[in-house]
Image (cartoon, rainbow, N blue to C red):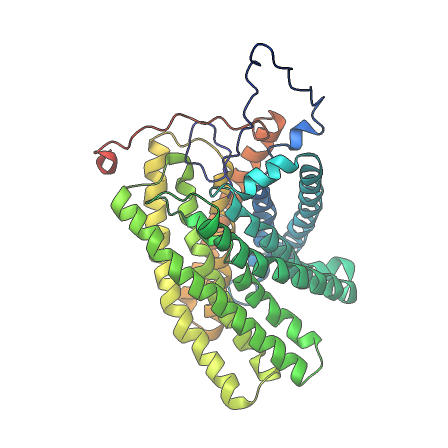
């Protein structure tokens, strides 16, 4: 979900290259040598790397949602999901450590990332990585570490992810308004990343409600989850028109940025998942009239939103095929094929449980196959890029060329 493609100047996570010092003028003292750069391999490790954690965790979370929904069993699915969850937890520890090293040794680059409108939105990925691993900890991780430790770890990850997610939902849009230089027609699906974390929290909260004492505690978390749902949904409804207007008026995204179109699926699938999970636990938290209303809302909201998600999936798929034909290189943007599609799997599985329609069950299964293929390709290419050290190298900016008049018809 972050970009490291070299030739594209419009890539979503293009890091700012520090300017080199020019030769000193005659009669002036040369600048002091700053000495060797510490941890040089971490200098260009941006917040987009949390996408590897999100994309891996969603494979486990989506797979755990399928049993009881699919009309057939998949032997070994839960065991495989547990193994993938363990991998996502290990990845989270590694990326958190690496990012801490980046912040300690390369504060100038960290500031540059935060002030770069193409990179700053990825700070929302930290919250989603914490939340995605937390959901897996509660749903499949308990098989390994036990229910008590899993609940405690999930609660910590929920609180940390929710607080960080709310902070990113406010701080990044604030920077976009007062600090970033956002050019007209530059709206990107990446803008959704800072505002989606509260929606992930809204889907996570219902899993913790049964662990709380009955009464005020459960009702408070239920309504807090609905409030988080509203925060993310309304922010998404503000951003989506700008993204579509950019496509209509300025043509397709740069080739390396094309996978970012799949990010639109994230709030769609995650919101469908959230209302379904909230409806499942509502009878344990609120009186009957409200509980039945929440159950009806899960279907009335989820079905049309899932329909729009499928429409957008078709549009994004066609644009991706076009980009592949144009020579789309591998970049970290390819992780955008994973987490958003995974949220559609959990959303379709929730609708299958609430409507009892086999069509939604088959849809969830088909999307899960697509998710597995996307995750496998992104993982292999990422490992290959790490081995070659290409993904950790300084990005190369291509000179910005004027957009040709025939951009739409190429």
Q: How many marks?
A: 0
Q: Nearer the viewer, residue 211 or 394?
A: 394
Residue at image location 67% in from the left, 59% down from the top: 160
Identify the residue shown where x is 44% and y is 77%: 297
Q: Position of residue 322 (x, y in %)?
A: 32, 37
Residue at 57% over, 9% down: 26
Q: Is residue 212 left or right of residue 64?
A: right
Res 75 visible: no
- Outermost residue, front direction? 27
Q: Is 98 above or below relative to 134? A: above
Residue ranking furthest to the top: 26
Where residue 257 sits, quadrant-wise, is top left
Determine whether 138 is above or below 328 in the image. Answer: below
Task: Please name whichever residue, 33 or 84, is drawn nearer the observer in this view of the structure.
Answer: 33
- Left or right: where does residue 187 sit relative to residue 127? left
Residue 295 at least partly seen: yes
Tell me where residue 95 sits by quadrant: top right
Whether 164 is drawn above or below 396: the answer is below
Horizontal side of 346 relative to 403 (left or right) equals right
Looking at the image, is 355 positioned above or below residue 310? below
């Amino acid at each position: 979900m972050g970009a490291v493609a070299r030739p594209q100047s419009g890539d979503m996570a293009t890091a700012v290259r520090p300017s080199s010092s020019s030769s000193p003028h005659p009669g002036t003292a040369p600048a002091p040598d700053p000495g060797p750069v510490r941890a040089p391999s971490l200098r260009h490790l941006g917040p987009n790397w949390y996408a590897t954690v999100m994309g891996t965790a969603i494979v486990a979370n989506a797979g755990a949602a399928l049993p009881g929904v699919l009309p057939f069993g998949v032997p070994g699915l839960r065991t495989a999901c547990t193994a993938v969850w363990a991998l996502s937890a290990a990845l989270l520890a590694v990326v958190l450590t690496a990012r801490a090293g980046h912040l300690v040794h390369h504060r100038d680059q960290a500031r540059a990332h935060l002030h770069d409108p193409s990179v700053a939105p990825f700070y929302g990925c930290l919250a989603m990585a914490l939340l995605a691993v937390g959901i897996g900890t509660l749903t499949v991780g308990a098989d390994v570490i036990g229910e008590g430790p899993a609940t405690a770890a999930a609660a910590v990850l929920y609180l940390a992810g929710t607080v960080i997610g709310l902070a990113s939902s406010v701080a990044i849009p604030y920077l976009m308004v007062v600090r970033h230089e956002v050019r007209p027609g530059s709206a990107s699906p990446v803008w959704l990343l800072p505002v989606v974390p509260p929606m992930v929290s809204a889907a996570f909260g219902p899993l913790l409600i049964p662990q709380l004492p009955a009464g005020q505690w459960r009702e408070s978390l239920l309504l807090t989850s609905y409030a988080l749902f509203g925060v993310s949904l309304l922010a998404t409804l503000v951003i989506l028109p700008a993204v579509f207007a950019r496509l209509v008026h300025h043509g397709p995204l740069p080739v390396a940025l094309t996978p970012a179109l799949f990010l639109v699926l994230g709030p769609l699938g995650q919101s469908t998942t959230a209302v379904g999970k909230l409806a499942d636990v509502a009878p344990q938290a609120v009186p009957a009239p409200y509980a039945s209303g929440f159950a009806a809302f899960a279907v009335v909201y989820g079905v049309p939103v899932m329909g729009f998600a499928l429409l957008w999936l078709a549009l994004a798929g066609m644009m991706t095929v076009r980009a592949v034909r144009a020579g789309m290189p591998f970049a970290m943007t390819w992780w955008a094929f994973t987490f958003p599609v995974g949220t559609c799997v959990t959303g379709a599985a929730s609708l299958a449980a609430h409507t009892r329609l086999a069509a939604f069950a088959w849809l969830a299964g088909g999307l899960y196959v697509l998710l597995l293929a996307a995750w496998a390709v992104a993982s292999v290419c990422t490992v290959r890029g790490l081995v070659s050290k290409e993904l950790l190298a300084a990005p190369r900016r291509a000179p910005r060329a004027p957009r040709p008049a025939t951009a739409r018809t190429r």
